[in-house]
Amino acid sequence: MRALLLGGAGFIGLHLARRLLADGHEVTVVDDFSRGRRDDALAGLAVEVRSADLTDPAAYDALEPGWDQVFMLAAVVGVRNVESGPARVLRVNTLSLMHLLDWMGPGRGRLFFASTSEAYAGAVSTGLAAVPTAEDVPLVIEDVGSARHTYAISKLLGEAAVLHTARAKGFEAVIGRFHNVYGPRMGADHVIPELSLRAGRGEDPFTLYGADQSRAFCHVDDAVEAVVRLMAEPRAAGRIVHIGNDAETNIGDLAKLVLRIAGTNPEIRHVPAPPGSVARRCPDLTLLRELTGYEPRVALEDGVRRTYAWYRESWTG
């Protein structure tokens, strides 16, 4: 099988490439390296790597036919990146996908589009959706002028564009909504790496944002397993499917776990969560289980230990 990973030099992309190679597939990575990394981890994989600006239609004109699976992972992500450049988020996340959909068609592979739990966060915040949350809840943008919500807006548009274009042009597509995926090499702008880096530096007092909030954290190995299974399942075509772990964890307890693994016991300084951050997030995985038989395998403590060790030994900033 030939797999094309767009945005494949990023966090999930690298882990997915590694898994596809282990399964015996041929993998090509395309990235503009604005966030993806040209590091030893990527260089150590037997993949073809191409540099291209995916917001430019010429990048797709240069792609040959003959792919079995296409994974659209390219996007501007991370709260800091989103809030500092909301117009860039909308431009990059929308144009890169729209040009891909212009290029897609029968015989050009089955498409996986990486979406996000942020797509339905407004429904949870406004009380329109329960937690754990299923795929069929209303999708709500609380404030269209909020920079934070531009990421969700770009992914809402992406979900609609993928579903309708796939039907119109006659190719198969699967949409996976990732929920708080974590692991080695994901950068520093996410909660578990950020806590790990500060704990490793011995920060004291230790600032903790939103300790009373909760999330369901999914190790990247489990997320990749779900993606691989969905792309192999015919019944997943044309579906939006939640990907994650449904074991909910309090942020205060997560911080205690990270600090224990780091071997430090600082004074904790509690501060409120950033504005716009949902109080709870946990996916209902009923559909994913029914389609694929998926079950998360990496326990939180094991995953955090592995992630902390990687950042202690390998993170260069």
Image (cartoon, helix red, strand yellow):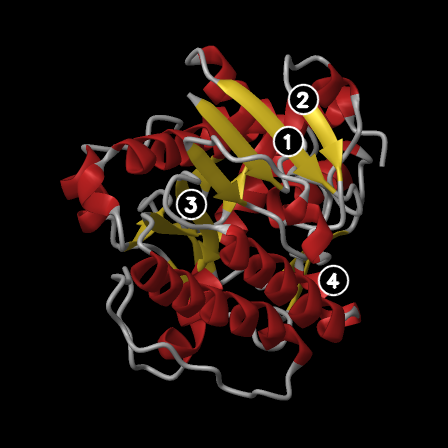
In the structure shown, which secondary structural element does the residue marked by tag 1 occupy? strand
Which residue is disc 1 drawn over? 29
Whichever of callouts 3 and 2 sits on the residue coming sooner in the sequence is 2
Characterize the local packing of mark 1: few (<14), some (14-19) or many (20 or more) Cα atoms within 10 angstroms.
Answer: many
Give the residue displayed 47% in from the left and 32% down from the top.
67
Q: Quadrant of the N terminus?
A: top left
Residue 104 sits above or below residue 164 on the image: above
Mark linked to residue 80: 4
Give the residue displayed 73% in from the left and 39% down from the top.
36
Mark 4–mark 1 distance (CA, rounded to whole Å): 26 Å
Which residue is disc 2 drawn over? 48
Could you tell me residue 223's position as x and y percent?
A: 42, 36
Amino acid identity at mark 2 = Glu
Characterize the local packing of mark 3: few (<14), some (14-19) or many (20 or more) Cα atoms within 10 angstroms.
Answer: many
Amino acid identity at mark 4 = Arg
Mark linked to residue 63: none
The reply, left or right, for residue 298 in relation to residue 38 is left
Give the residue displayed 52% in from the left and 18% down from the top.
26
